[in-house]
Image: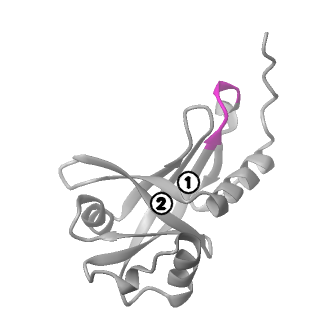
Amino acid sequence: MKITPPPREPGQRRQDVLDRLERERDIWVATADAEGLPCLVPLWFVWHAGSVWLCTRLTNPTGRNLRDGGRVRLAFGHTRDVVLIDGEVETFGLREVPSAAAGAFHGKTGWDPREDSPSYAWFRVRPLAVQAWHEQRELGKRHIMRDGAWTV
């Protein structure tokens, strides 16, 4: 019989999420268009100054949905170690992005979109809600941020 570890304390969940935001390179990005057609893609990202920064082309569905919808759900992990982040999106032109955010992105990914196609745009995602859980045993206390404020 396999013994399951006890649920993590909420403060540990928050720290685990922050660690993953620093460590992970890819994040699932879920958007929808005005008609509700969903789009789910992985993108590179950087956690910088309390926000998730993404970069993609405005000519693809994800870029248009981020710009036009202003909301996104981001996700890490597999079904036994889940992090969901709901956030509001602010769009920046390729040259309008704060240099510190672009520099942090370049430092993490090795790619500087400012030197790429002008069809790219930057997206700052300010987290409004964060959920994190390991399997069913942590579902009850999975909400660790609400209304943009950490609850733990």
Residue 12: x and y in percent read 79, 48
Which residues are the magenta region?
132-137
- Disc 1 residue type (three-letter): Ala
Q: Quickly name the residue at label 2.
A: 87
Q: Secondary structure at mark 1?
A: strand
Residue at left offset 73%, top offset 47% = 13
Render colour scheme? one colour
Residue at left offset 71%, top offset 57% = 19
Q: Is residue 139 above or below residue 25?
A: above
Mark number, residue 129? 1
Which corner quadrant of the image does residue 51 belong to? Answer: bottom right
Please give left or right for residue 64 compared with residue 76 in the image: left
Residue 5: x and y in percent read 81, 27
Q: Is residue 152 visible?
A: no
Residue at left offset 53%, top offset 75% = 105
Please give left or right for residue 117 compared with residue 2 in the image: left
Residue 34: x and y in percent read 20, 55
User: How crowded is the residue under tag 2: few (<14 C-alpha within 10 Å), some, or many (20+)?
Assistant: many
Residue at left offset 66%, top offset 63% = 22
Pick whichever, 113 or 11, lies toward us. 113
Q: Is residue 125 visible?
A: yes
User: Does 1 lie within the magenta span?
Assistant: no
Q: Are marks 1 and 2 in contact (CB under 8 Å)?
A: yes
Q: Secondary structure at mark 2?
A: strand
Sequence-wise first label, 1 or 2? 2
Q: Is residue 79 above or below residue 99?
A: above
